[in-house]
Image: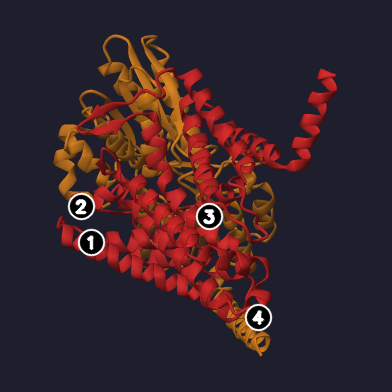
């Protein structure tokens, strides 16, 4: 278990060291207007939405499912909240808007759960419905416009600071809660059991359907909170681009973290590392000045390297060569 | 049991979809001889305030001109746009108009349109193809000129060594390539002005903010931000404020577009100069369409009228800004 997390951790450290080598001031932290300011803080702030969505995704993947609709759900959350806030500057309106958005997201999660657990549709197909339709819904809500708001309370979610960025505090709080609920109770084990063999767990008395349903609702709520962060960060709802492709980043984070797409055993710490690696990678591209034309190739090479490092076969080949050289 | 329900559900869904498809096809096929002109328009997406103003102008002016408009939104993906153009060819519209997402890769689908005898009008963005017979005309802004205007202003207003960071648009998109080119052309005359970092912010606020945050940490001295659109500039403003600096004073900002949110920031003194890129080309497009359908000659290139705004001009222009 420890060994599985070692490689992602090394990859993260290597990326950070690369940044340090190119920009010696990368690790520099200072207080700015009462909050921490520096490259690492940016990684945490901008990585928070991916981390949150990846957390929900981890549990979904542990049940042998997948949720492709999270990006669209994130866009809907931002759209609904910004349209509700409108020109209002009051904190009460902002909180009401966020509450409405999250309830709506939970309902969307229920829909996904219904398709997967209720009708038994393949998760990748079931959530594809909302992935496509959801963006349309978000566009309808915003009428195709970018809705700009000016609300101090709403700004706090994605751009605010309590020494550290509020967004990462929220994400870590959710991580702590999930870790507590799934690891200190039997829930985590039940989720893994459903992922390994839903039928056997049902026969053993586990309510497989309820559990699957729950993880999809949880994933949608996580996506909703992430959507609020993304939209609040720039005080605007962009139905087209908010959370675009974030489902892929989230799945990648889960996989880099060592959770198998085949379901079963999952690692929350791994997901945390995975999300941080992905965000650090993006920041690295900007910091070291990779040309935009080769950015995607650069990212792909890093991701392939990380995945290879984790694959037992590739590692075996690597250590074999080492032995051969030293002898 | 469950399987049965799923099958029934999918059959219902499928038949509903086909019904929509045939419904859409039934009322088309009108030729210019039949009276009304049908136009298939494949829009890039709704990625910015500029684009939505552009969409609205086209929709309103089509209605005013009595042209039957079939509109599709490609959500910034070329494959969606190609699909939309193919479906317009099948529906036998009178004219196809579109703003290409990227510059290359259009030859095949435009050749299909040419073979079907459907004239094509490019709006706002051009394509990179050796075969100019693939489209009738290109109506839109001169992006290189926009870049030049931005460069001119900086050359006139910069004093001493000036470090510029550039927020590029979507990689491969015509406005990103041309606005970069025109800007570089002009600042080359003043060796003091240097572009120290340049990254894509994908024309979005989030992108602009994230890239600017990274620049502020990796670049020791930034004097000017040149953003390829207002939205990225607005994102950069947020990042500059979070770094404890004053946008418009400590770091000067030049953007392109002049959408309402951008003009507001310009009037507030947070942006220093905006080069206008006029999205209201609906009327010109409809006029061209009528001419093309009537078989009249049209020029190969029609440039939209646009200007520039300083902070004072923005204050004056803001009240009657439509978008």
Mark 4 residue crowding within 10 angstroms, few (<14) / some (14–19) / many (20+): few
Name the residue carrying label 3.
Answer: A247
How far is disc 1 from disc 4 in space, using C-alphas? 43 Å
Name the residue carrying label 2.
Answer: A153
Is B11 or B245 nearer to us in this picture?
A: B245
Q: Earlier in the sequence, mark 2 or mark 4?
A: 2
Tag 2 and tag 4 share a subunit? yes
Secondary element at image label 2:
helix
Q: Is residue A313 left or right of residue B265?
A: right
Q: Colour of chain B?
A: orange
Q: Earlier in the sequence, mark 3 or mark 1?
A: 1
Is A103 or B58 nearer to us in this picture?
A: A103
Secondary element at image label 1:
helix
Q: Earlier in the sequence, mark 3 or mark 4?
A: 4
Tag 3 and tag 2 share a subunit? yes
Name the residue carrying label 1.
Answer: A95
How far is disc 3 from disc 1 in space, using C-alphas? 26 Å
């Amino acid at each position: 278990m420890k060994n599985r997390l070692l490689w992602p951790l090394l990859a993260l450290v290597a990326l950070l060291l690369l940044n340090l080598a190119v920009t010696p001031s990368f690790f520099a932290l200072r207080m700015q207007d009462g909050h921490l300011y520096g490259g690492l803080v940016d990684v945490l702030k901008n990585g928070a939405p991916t981390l949150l969505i990846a957390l929900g995704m981890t549990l979904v993947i542990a049940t042998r499912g997948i949720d492709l609709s999270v990006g669209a759900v994130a866009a809907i959350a931002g759209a609904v909240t910004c349209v509700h806030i409108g020109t209002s500057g009051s904190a009460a309106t902002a909180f009401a808007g966020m509450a409405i958005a999250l309830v709506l997201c939970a309902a969307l999660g229920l829909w996904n759960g219904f398709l997967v657990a209720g009708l038994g549709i393949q998760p990748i197909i079931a959530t594809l419905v909302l992935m496509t339709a959801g963006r349309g819904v978000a566009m309808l809500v915003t009428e195709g416009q970018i809705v700009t708001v000016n609300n101090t309370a709403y700004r706090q979610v994605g751009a605010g600071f309590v020494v550290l960025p509020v967004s990462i505090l929220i994400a870590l709080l959710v991580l702590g809660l999930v870790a507590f609920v799934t690891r200190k109770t039997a829930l985590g084990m039940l989720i893994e059991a459903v992922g390994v063999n839903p039928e056997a767990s049902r026969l053993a008395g586990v309510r497989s359907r309820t559990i699957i349903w729950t993880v999809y609702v949880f994933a949608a709520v996580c996506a909703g909170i992430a959507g609020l962060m993304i939209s609040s960060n720039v005080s605007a709802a962009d139905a087209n681009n908010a959370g675009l492709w974030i489902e892929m980043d989230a799945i990648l984070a889960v996989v880099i973290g060592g959770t198998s797409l085949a379901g079963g055993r999952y690692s929350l710490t791994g997901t945390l590392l995975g999300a941080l690696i992905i965000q650090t990678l993006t920041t690295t591209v900007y910091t070291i000045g990779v040309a935009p034309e080769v950015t995607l190739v650069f990212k792909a090479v890093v991701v392939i390297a990380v995945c290879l490092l984790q694959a037992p076969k590739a590692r075996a080949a690597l250590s074999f060569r080492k032995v051969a050289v030293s002898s | 049991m469950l399987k049965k329900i799923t099958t029934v559900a999918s059959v219902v869904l499928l038949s509903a979809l086909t019904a929509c498809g045939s419904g859409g096809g039934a009322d088309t096929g009108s030729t210019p001889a039949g009276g009304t002109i049908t136009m298939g328009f494949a829009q890039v997406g709704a990625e910015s305030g500029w684009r939505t103003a552009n969409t609205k102008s086209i929709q309103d002016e089509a209605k005013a001109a009595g042209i039957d408009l079939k509109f599709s939104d490609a959500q910034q993906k070329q494959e969606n746009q190609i699909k939309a153009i193919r479906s317009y060819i099948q529906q036998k519209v009178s004219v196809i108009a579109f703003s290409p997402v990227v510059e290359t890769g259009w030859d095949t689908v435009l050749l299909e349109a040419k073979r079907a005898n459907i004239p094509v009008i490019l709006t706002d963005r051009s394509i990179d193809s050796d075969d100019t017979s693939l489209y009738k005309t290109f109506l839109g802004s001169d992006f290189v000129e926009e870049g030049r205007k931005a460069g001119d202003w900086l050359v006139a207003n910069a004093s001493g060594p000036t470090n510029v960071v550039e927020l590029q648009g979507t990689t491969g998109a015509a406005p990103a390539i041309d606005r970069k080119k025109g800007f570089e052309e002009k600042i080359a005359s003043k060796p003091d002005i240097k572009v120290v970092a340049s990254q894509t912010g994908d024309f979005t606020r989030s992108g602009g903010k994230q890239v600017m945050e990274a620049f502020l940490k990796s670049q020791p001295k930034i004097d000017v931000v040149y953003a390829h659109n207002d939205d990225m500039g607005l994102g950069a403003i947020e990042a500059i404020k979070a770094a404890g600096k004053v946008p418009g004073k400590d770091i000067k900002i030049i953007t392109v577009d002049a959408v309402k949110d951008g003009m507001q920031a310009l009037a507030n003194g947070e942006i220093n100069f905006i080069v206008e890129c006029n999205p209201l080309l609906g009327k010109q497009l409809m006029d061209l369409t009528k001419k093309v359908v009537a078989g009249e000659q049209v020029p190969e290139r029609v440039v939209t009228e646009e200007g520039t705004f300083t902070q004072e001009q923005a204050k004056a222009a803001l009240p009657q800004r439509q978008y």
